[in-house]
Image (cartoon, grey):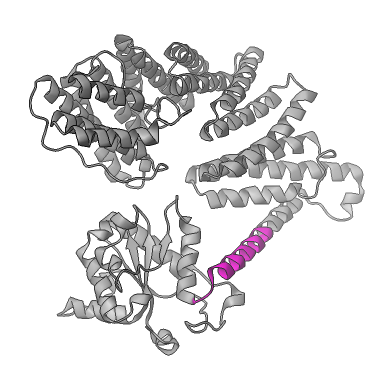
Amino acid sequence: MLDPGQQQAAHYSAFISYSRHDSRLARWLQSALESYRMPRRLVGTPTPRGPVADRFQPVFLDLSELTVAPDLLDELSAALGASQYLIVLCTPRAAASEWVNREIRLMQQQNRGDHILAALFEGDEHESFPPALLNAEGSRQPLAADFRAQGDGRRLALLKLVAAMSGVGLGELVHREEGRRIRRLSVLAAASLAGMLAFGGISFYALNARAQAEAERRKSEAMVNSLVTDLRGAVKPVGNLSMLERVNDAAVSYFRGQSLQNMPDAALATRARLLTAMGEDEATRGNMATARSHFQEAARTTAARLAVAPHDPQRIYDHAQVEYWLGHYAWSAGNPADARRAWSEYERLARELVERQPEDPRWHLEAGYAQSNIGVLDLRQNLDVTRAEARFGAALRQYQAALKLDPTNLTARSDVSDGLAWLSDSQRVAGKLAAARQTREQQAKLLRATLAHAPEDTELRKMLVVNEIAFGRIAAAAGQRSEALQRFRTARTMAATLAEADRDSAVLKATSRMATIWEAHAQLAAAARHSRQAPPTVPPCLRTSPEDAGAEAEDWCRLLHARHALLAGDRAQARHMIEDVAAGRLKPGAPRLSARFGLDYAQEIQDLEQLMATGKTGEGDGKGEGIQKGEG
């Protein structure tokens, strides 16, 4: 262990050990540590680690910082000796890295195991901690800062590392950090207000003139409205939630301290839109309880405004948006009854907008979204394919009406594609395979025509991957196994190409993984039909948490392994796999079809039970194995 004097003499604050496949994460961590500044009130505070420093600089990252030396291990050992801490960036790739394990052992050989910190970014401790890390100092594991979204999250995990390296208690550090954040946002809010006031040219003396004060108030409210609409619209595509939070807080500061009873209608409308936007941001973060409170508060405002002018299209639209989000919250919270109530009201309001202004394409799109939402409930929750098909057909007609009114509307064009996908899925599950194929062909034609005008659009290419998987599932349901196998192979190749260019997309990884599993499923089906021995290998299943994008695919993978075990004669292994998936997926009140891929675990398990009992399955009857989510 370094004493305080050695700590001050160390050249590096930390040495980051990582797999070369995780270089992007490593660079982010290096930047986050080097740019972090300790709260001013803590700098210089005595701790067992020595006085608290202002910053952690420099942080050793990779071999580019080593000089050319005859013995690289000597150079590594010297770099580790010159570093206060070794931070191990833990992922499944790091666990398999010989160099990462070697760097850990070198640190241990210097009797500095207590200066090894683990930063968990992917997987869990069993699959992502390098063996040398798990064996450090016997059975004791080093401190783990969990950077995963379902763990501490990046902000709190970074503070855990900072606390360990500085000797400051985590509670004290979080408290100081929150105080600094509040002061920073207060300055931003004040600056925003100052900008509004300067924009309006308001002076203390001018406010004495009532008419001018009213005019300047309207200008300030217009500036706030610009924060809520224009600035958020510019920031949102970047996906930076912290930046959106700053925009939200700057706008909220305007309303703070004002009486809602005395607030002008335009300000009430802006406040309602702000609350809706804040709820949407919290929903994106997964903070559904906070999101719900924002939506409920917005709903009270929009309902009151609508009661004053019930035929105003803008007020109808504002209240419809809040009803949509209330339904979204209820559905995410596992309350389909409340979701149906909210979405039914959303559908009524959207229909009224179309009736009042039938030439406005925006209202046709809203009506389509509302029909589609209820269709999802009918299909996913209850497997009511008749009602679902009718809803998706109605939604598609609304999207097509919007596109006819505005042929250049790219949103409408995308929505038509999405509507065709949902309609085809409902047709397939209903056993109308010819109709399902024809509908998917319409979608493929539309996607390729759009892609010809936007060849660099990766979202369109992702939709084509999902479209190809859907064709495979239609073919499999019809017993056309050769076509199904070819479709799944093509989809897997397409998805792998896209995933290589966008390695951070969890959804794309899950889609690629699903294509691989469907391909193996088709191979097993073909082997069983020809009474051949099952293929010797199937894709290994990965460990995931229920919140992971790939969780559905891995549970489906376990059922694939159950099918493989049955065909190989291992009934005990098959039974174990089936019961494992059933325990997690067939809970009372759970939707019949899964959330992301619309997989029918109940039907697949029933099919496997039938195979176990009779040696025959229900494949090729147009039923079972769920739907592909109509997102492409």
242 sits left or right of 481 in the view: right
Residue that appears at 72% across and 51% down? 253
Residue 245, position as x, y percentages in the image: 59, 50
**Quick check: can you spot residue 301?**
yes
Residue that appears at 69% across and 32% down? 299
Residue at the far left in the pictured view: 532
Residue 187 versus residue 482: which sits nearer the camera?
482
Residue that appears at 62% across and 76% down? 41
| Residue 340 image-quadrant placement | top right
441 sits left or right of 314 in the view: left
Q: Up-down: is 267 above or below 126?
A: above
Main secondary-structure element of the magenta-colored stretch = helix
Residue 492, position as x, y percentages in the image: 23, 34
Point out the image quarter for the C terminus: top left
Q: Up-down: is 93 above or below 318?
A: below
Q: Identify the magenta region.
A: 167-187
Q: Is 485 within the magenta?
A: no
Residue 107 versus residue 195: which sits nearer the camera?
107
Residue 593 versus residue 99: which sits nearer the camera?
593
Residue 158, position as x, y percentages in the image: 47, 63
**Quick check: can you spot residue 600?**
no
Residue that appears at 74% across and 42% down? 221
| Residue 71 image-quadrant placement | bottom left
Point out the image quarter for the N terminus: bottom left
418 sits left or right of 406 in the view: left
Residue 386, position as x, y percentages in the image: 44, 10
Residue at the far bottom in the pictured view: 5
Q: Is 169 within the magenta?
A: yes
Q: So how many labels did they put on this image?
A: 0
Q: Up-down: is 140 above or below 281?
A: below
287 sits left or right of 582 in the view: right
